[in-house]
Amino acid sequence: MSTYRLSNVLAPQSVALVGASPRKGSLGAAILQNIREAGFAGQIGIVNPRYGEIAGMKVASHIDRLPFAPELVVITAPAREIPGIVDAAGKRGAAGAVIVSAGLGHGPGSISEATERAARAHRMRLIGPNCLGIMMPGIDLNASFAAHMPRRGNLALISQSGAIAAGMVDWASQKSVGFSGIVSIGDQLDVDIADLLDYFALDRATGAILLYIEAIRDARKFMSAARAAARVKPIVVVKSGRMAQGARAAATHTGALAGADDVYDAAFRRAGMLRVFDLGELFDCAEMLGRLAAPPGKRLAMLTNGGGLGVLAVDRLAELGGVTAELSAAARERLDAVLPRTWSGSNPIDIIGDADAARYAAALEILLADPGNDAVLVMNVQTAVASAADIAETVMGVVAASPEKRRRKPVLAVWVGAGPEISKKFDAAGIPNFATEGDAVRGFMYLVKHREAVEALSAVPPSLPADFVPDVEAARSIVQAAVAEGRRWLDPAEVRRLFDAYQIDMVPTLEAADLEQAAAFAESLFAKGSKVVLKVLSRDITHKSDVGGVVLNLATVDEVRQAAAEILSRARRLRPDAKIAGILVQSMVVRPKGRELILGIAEDPTFGPVMVFGRGGTAVEIINDKALMLPPLDLALARALIERTRVSRLLTAYRDVPAVKQDAVALTLVKLAQLAADLPEVTGLDINPLLADASGVLALDARVTVATPGRRFAGPGNTRFAVRPYPSQWVRQLAVKDGWKVVARPIRPEDEPLIHDFLRHVTQEDLRLRFLAPMKQFSHEFIARLTQLDYARAMAFVAIDEATGELSGVVRLHSDSVYETGEYAILLRSDLKGRGLGWALMQLLIEYARSEGLKRIYGQVLRENTTMIEMCRNLGFTVEPDPTERDLFDVTLPL
């Protein structure tokens, strides 16, 4: 239910604790003490039928007996009583409950099912059960049994583990780091990670979101919320169980390469989240993101009184992908004027071991003003010559006194061997400080990676080649026929036809039933000047080389007969259970400068189809040079996938080897991703190897697994992708006045230039009516958020004038996470109003909302926007004054 009533749960004006107890060591006693000590200003009530008073507070025997209606109920009562407590709280008007108690069970007939049913009857939200509770420092609410209350700050923590949440609080109290909210979600009976991502993404007090994850249940909902939140705030995630993949058998190389944690990693990357791998990293990353803005680049200047420390920092920076900043000529000249002649003369700026506070201050001033770097790391090794504490105080003073523009430049500190007092002073000054130069460099790179993730989310990808139009119907008939026959694998001829339908070149393959037919086929290939390859033909033998089922470089008919006989003999001996259909005969492709790659589709039980790319060949699992990405893909995403592998370096020119044809490999990945979107029956696919060189790409071997498609995610359309593919089925010709030809289609990321041009044709008055406030300029980031949709909870249709190709209007719908209510917005070019376009776009939006299964469409319209209000009435909307905003009408259409 997304953020519905979450503001009442996480920022309540009144709280009741059901299960309060005087017994020392009990949950009821601990949470009551925390609520009272935190200083919550709202009404507090406690409920327990066995006591009349606890800790000087009057106790109600039942929720009905409280003198007020609690907005939030915190429950520590026994599990068997919880459904009744929730029902009573709902009847009293509570917005939600935090269920700390455990032992509610799972599934049909369980206490948790009864609890959920009671909550839904009253539209209550539930956090838990089996959780630590919630801590909201902004309203002084500590409804948890954590040992400490965190201070106020701008970090939000969402944790599947109560112990991790409690540990974060303890760490934060030592590091002077504050939180906007901490929510332990427990068993996620109702409120889940995605709901809280939605909430904290919109929370003005939250600057960054931290996640501790053990497993994701609804991957599409999670991806939708994460992608939306990451566009506006940093999200840092640590996931446990990285090594708990098990030795699961995989039918394809691709499946074997797509380990469970690798898929999670790909999902986090696709969502624009920053992944760290332990709590130490999470703490450091939290500190960085909570205190510093992301730099515009990755050039780091390093100021130190120890040369060796600077060299170590340079090594770590290069290892993590950062750049050692080049000193500008002006900066070097200024440094020469204030530093001894023996200073290093370059970055790292080694100002010599006898450096005092004044020397540090002079050098730091220059580096903060130098446009040649994006951040400054200040390091100090204690000496008997100068006081480390005095130098630290001076550095803090320089940073604090910097002009506003310079103050935005990140400054990090490493004081080797310094005591806790210096560290505390840096914390109080808002300067992240680290024990080692390696930790500090890693902290800087957190900022860099966050900026890169946001840029990737808002990038404008190129259009797909216009000549790529797959024959989807032909491909569908191939896979559906195999599924209808109960087969798991496509045979080689079917694979070849499938690839033809998606314009993927594959080496010609002939199927021979016996030795003589193999010899005849080979003779025809010899006549064309080609040697041949023989492979065993069996649907039961997945990896042919494992049974000696591949022989290369055959040049005569006699060699073919002998090799074919040996292949069949070995296969029957090593795999007596396999049905051998014959021999595959292929031309021997000799491309001495070709690179062997693997491309494929694997099926993950949580996230659905996953694209895999890496170095191919028979040792593919041993080499293990691969990268994963969730589909759908465009060329930009495919390029990014390729670049994450070591083999990508071999695709460029080196020595006498020319570069692989530009984008040939990336386009093949895009084609495979489209195949996965079009054909849900395809559950696995390998191309291994795909030979790539200057002339293009050629699939030498491939295998495809198929099965009856299952529904993985809620909603219509493609139910297998965690990131919903482009909904091309919603392209429509609109019926408008005077024969005007307008086509409406779902918005695409590459529409950004059209949007900018469109907005130049919209008056300031129309913009005010649309956005409910004056709008003077639109940044790239703002437009990117409008065009970069995942199509899971948001949709936008653009209306294109067929004659001019110009954008004439846009209509949008954003639904909640359970597809109940969608909020709409519409904007037309001011010079094209009155021609029926708005009516046509609204009808299209209503049709789409019905197909999605939404229950209602909702919007807010300024009272003075009489044209929109009248159109809404004519479309069947109810129009009512907004209860809180006098200038607004709320319009609602039941579907």
Image (cartoon, grey):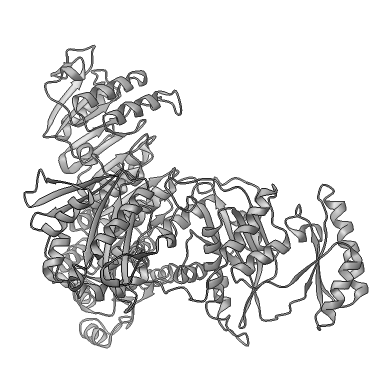
Instruction: Say above or below: 804 vs 690.
Output: below
For the C terminus, the quadrant is top left
Q: Nearer the viewer, residue 75 or 57?
A: 75
Residue 251 can be seen, yes or no? no
Residue nearest the viewer, comparing 862 with 669: 862
Query: Could you tell me which quadrant the N terminus lies in?
Result: top left
Front residue of this view, candidates 753 and 165:
753
- For the image shown, how many numbered marks are present on the structure? 0
Relative side of 490 to 729, left or right: right
The image quadrant that residue 797 belongs to is bottom left
In the image, 110 versus 49, the foreground residue is 110
Q: In this orientation, does residue 868 appear?
A: yes
The answer to whether 337 is drawn above or below residue 750 in the figure is below
Residue visible at 19% across and 28% down? 93
**x, y percentage for residue 805?**
33, 77
Q: Is residue 163 depicted above or below 384 in this figure?
A: above
Q: Position of residue 190 (x, y in %)?
A: 34, 36
> As drawn, which residue projects farthest toward the left?
886
Coordinates of residue 700 in the picture (x, y in percent): 70, 70
Quarter of image, res 744: bottom left
Q: Residue at 44%, 23% (x, y): give it.
A: 109
Q: Quadrant of residue 100?
A: top left
In x, y percent, where is residue 452?
A: 36, 67
Residue furthest to the front in view is: 738
> Is residue 841 toward the left or the right of residue 104 in the image?
left
